[in-house]
Image (spheres, rainbow, N blue to C red):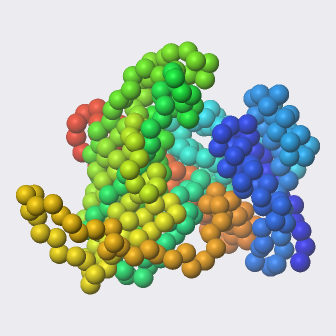
Amino acid sequence: MAERRIGIIVNGATGRMGYRQHLVRSLLAIQEQGGVELADGDRLVPDLLLVGRNEEKLAAIAERHGLANWTTDVDEALDNDDYEVYFDALVTNLRVENLKKAIAAGKAIYTEKPTAESFEDALELARLAREHGTVNGVVHDKLYLPGLLKLRRLIDSGFFGEILSVRGEFGYWVYEGDWQEAQRPSWNYRTEDGGGIVADMFPHWNYVIEELFGRIEDVYAQTATHIGQRWDEKGEQYTATADDAAYGVFRLEGGTVVQMNSSWDVRVHRDELVEFQVDGTKGSAVVGLHGAHIQPREATPKPVWNPDVKDSHNYYDDWIEVPDNEQFDNGFKVQWEDFLRHLADGVEGTSYPFDFLSGARGVRLAEAGLTSSAEGRRISLDPLTEA
């Protein structure tokens, strides 16, 4: 067994997601465990080059974690042949330009989503990557989380029978920023800066729905900017121009109907910040990012509707918790390991399944959702398997 180095450029290392999830909880954690084990028994160990726009923050992060290599010049980083992978965790409106540079520089690419602000740009990235033979992947972290892994296990076992419908609730109350500091950055609420809950969450819902339930054939959505005035990081009031809530209905190939409510203006009354209820002919499940409960057909109660009499039945008691049955690691870290193994061990000519084209489908769903809301109509989505 030998150690093999792999150089990774981490652009956006000072940002919330780039630092916390990707640098600390994924790449540094992979370093600490001695790398990623490959098919031949070797271990692939990341060597990191941090990139960011704020020199002071970047230097502090590098010192905190004992990292020697960092720069504020992304072009300089891309010119460095010792680093063969480019990772992008920038804000969305800066992503396309840098991904194109990375493609031209011959790097393998792994990126946060959405890959672009428009479907046209996202599809162009997929085309460029194909033409240049670029190994590319997009963060699909939700699929690697315990709850959805349990849901995949249930689906693969045939537990549901025919899946009829999926209902999802996502969101929490994000403070406006006046009397309590907001827990999301202010750019999220400005369309001109790439903000909006549709742009943020519909790409997630696209890959979750595609991978677990099937291809989305059409979408109907209603968006809203429920809170029009917010306060930024400096305590200054600004007008929110982006949608902060979206209510979508997705019809899938095969007939399953998915409803997704997404909101930063909702107070949580459920076990987790996101939950999916999946109802099938043979059973149902309620699944979060970590927990999962099921109710099989044989153990389903027989409610009778009578609004004049208080119902004393505790319906929560009719559900069975799904056991872990395995050790679950951080979802972002697990996908990093998955992508790096593909890069090192992947069969020539085989693309990483969660690639730029998958990312483009997510951007298309967001664009279609916004169009649906603006025009008050259902938007059809053709299959998209080639860039």
**Left or right relative to 62: residue 53:** left
Front residue (pair 183, 357): 183
- Residue at the image position 34 percent from the left and 47 percent from the top: 261
Q: Is residue 50 placed above or below 139 in the rendered structure?
A: above
Front residue (pair 369, 35): 35
- Residue at the image position 43 percent from the left and 20 percent from the top: 229
Where residue 311 appears, x then y in whole percent?
18, 64
Front residue (pair 106, 55): 55
Where residue 246 appears, x then y in whole percent?
35, 40
Figure label count: 0
Q: Is residue 213 placed above or below 178 in the rendered structure?
A: below
Where residue 361 appears, x then y in whole percent?
45, 51
Rendering quarter of residue 1? bottom right
Whether residue 282 is visible, yes or no, is: no
Q: Is residue 293 placed above or below 204 in the rendered structure?
A: below
Q: Is residue 154 placed above or below 257 in the rendered structure?
A: below
Whether residue 123 is visible, yes or no, is: yes
Where residue 362 appears, x then y in whole percent?
46, 49
**Left or right relative to 172: residue 305:** left
**Left or right relative to 112: residue 156:** left
Rendering quarter of residue 236? top right
- Residue at the image position 53 percent from the left and 58 percent from the top: 142
